[in-house]
Image: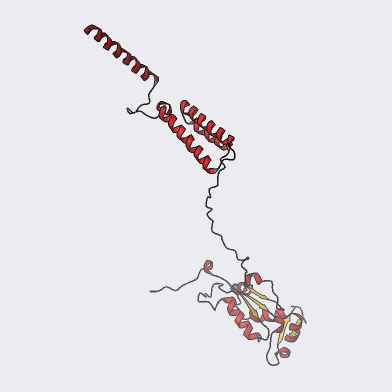
Amino acid sequence: MMKTYSPKAKEITRDWVVIDAAGVPLGRLASQVAQLLRGKHKPTFAPHLDTGDHVVVINAEKIALTGAKLDQKMYYRHSGYPGGFRATKVRDELARRPIRVIERAVKGMLPHTALGKVQYGKLRVYPGPDHPHAGQVNPGPGKVKTKRAPQETASIPTETQTDDATLSANASALMSTMPATTASATTASATTASATTASAPAASTSDLGAQSAAAQQDAAREVAEHPEASGEPTEAGSTPTDMDDVEQDTTGRGRATTSQGNEEAKA
């Protein structure tokens, strides 16, 4: 079984409608405006909710009345005091306050309740063709309030300048993490490379590449000649120490002395 749809107040959307009253009969204009204010033109209309749109009526002073209504139709009011009865023709009202003619006609076609007062508050009437609601009726591209999605900024790597200060800083950081012997060898290589670069400022790109390759080869040769200074583990999985060297030298000398004594005894 299907349930009857009942709109909620937060689901209601309202538009802005502009109606030109020039040459339009007063009764037809008022009935059309009342329907727009109530929202009866929408499929989500509910008699207990204000589902209507905002209506802007322009050229109210050019409204049309058929027949002899300009002189026969009267507006009546009373001040509440004895002798305070007043009657005004539509012709005179259009000449003085043309806005009141349309407002009274539309108000009489709306519900005479608190909801009708709210719906009547969405009506704007102007005597001429100009109105201050252009931003609501036709919002331009710069007036539409939209939430911009956060833009992801891609990190662009920047080219680093390899000058003398950068080289010295990198060398200092590298030496702080290396043993003393390797650090001294690396310092000597870096000093040689910087001296070579300073002595040949007009060297080409190929010469600089060859110098850097030579410096890398020198550093690799230093590490190969002094493996104990680089801190790399030996085949037994431990770093050699000075005590191990002393023990190896003492054992070798003892073996040599024993072999010499055996040869003398045999002789």
**Does the rendering let one see residue 75?**
yes
Task: Identify the residue at the far right of this view.
Answer: 83
Q: Image check: 153 left or right of 69?
A: left
Q: Is residue 88 above or below residue 45?
A: below
Determine which quarter of the picture holds residue 60.
bottom right
Residue 38: percent from left, percent from top: 57, 76
Residue 133: percent from left, percent from top: 66, 71
Task: Identify the residue at the far left of this view.
Answer: 266
Q: Is residue 92 above or below residue 149?
A: below
Q: Image check: 249 left or right of 139?
A: left
Residue 177: percent from left, percent from top: 48, 31
Task: Identify the residue at the far bottom of this view.
Answer: 67
Residue closer to the observer: 150 or 199: 199
Residue closer to the observer: 54 or 80: 54
Query: What scheme was used to colour the molecule?
Result: secondary structure
Q: Residue at x 72, y 89 (%)?
A: 70
Q: Residue at x 45, y 34 (%)?
A: 217
Q: Residue at x 64, y 85 (%)?
A: 27
How many marks on residues?
0
Residue closer to the observer: 65 or 262: 262
**Does the rendering let one see residue 86?**
no
Determine which quarter of the picture holds residue 124.
bottom right
The quarter in which the C terminus is drawn is top left
Determine which quarter of the picture holds residue 3.
bottom left
Q: Is residue 103 above or below residue 151?
A: below
Residue 238: percent from left, percent from top: 35, 26
Task: Identify the residue at the far front of this view.
Answer: 267
